Image: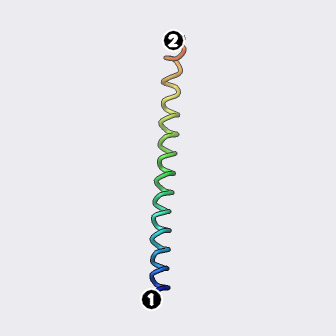
Amino acid sequence: MRLLSSIIASLVVIRSWNQFLRYSTLQVYYCTIVNVHALPALGPDQANIE
């Protein structure tokens, strides 16, 4: 019984870790896309201000 509960605990931890990694990867990907799209838009404005 104890072995079974430890296996279930391990599965839960692995599953939540996978979800965390997937969320982090999506967040980094989203931030990268936003930055790539934002840079060209900011470029001319910065030049005009200076």
Query: 12 or 29, which is in the foreground?
Result: 12
Left or right, residue 43 beside residue 12? right
Where 46 sits versus 26, above or below? above
Counting from the top left corner in percent of width and height, residue 15 is at 46, 67
**Image quarter (top left, top right, bottom left or bottom right) of the N terminus:** bottom left
Q: Which mark is residue 16?
A: none
Question: Which residue lies under the disc numbered 2?
Answer: 48
Q: Residues within 10 Å of mark 2 (few under 14, many from 20)?
A: few
Which residue is disc 1 drawn over?
Answer: 1
Mark 2 or mark 1, which has the lower sequence index? 1
Compared to residue 6, the image places residue 43 above or below, namely above
Q: Secondary structure at mark 2?
A: helix
**Amino acid found under the numbered disc labelled 2:** Asn
Q: Position of residue 12 (x, y in %)?
A: 45, 71
The C terminus appears in which quarter of the rendering?
top right
Furthest residue toward bottom: 1
Marks 1 and 2: in contact by CB < 8 Å? no
Q: Give the image location of residue 28, x and y in percent.
A: 51, 45
Report the residue at 47% width, 47% height from top: 27
Identify the residue shown where x is 50% and y is 12%.
49
Q: Amino acid at mark 1?
A: Met
Above or below residue 18? Residue 32 is above
Q: For the point 50% across and 39% down, which residue is it? A: 33
For the point 47% across and 36% down, which residue is it?
34
Which residue, as the protein is rendered here, is positioned at the far front? 2
Q: CA distance from mark 2 to mark 1?
A: 70 Å
Q: Circle 1 — which element?
A: loop
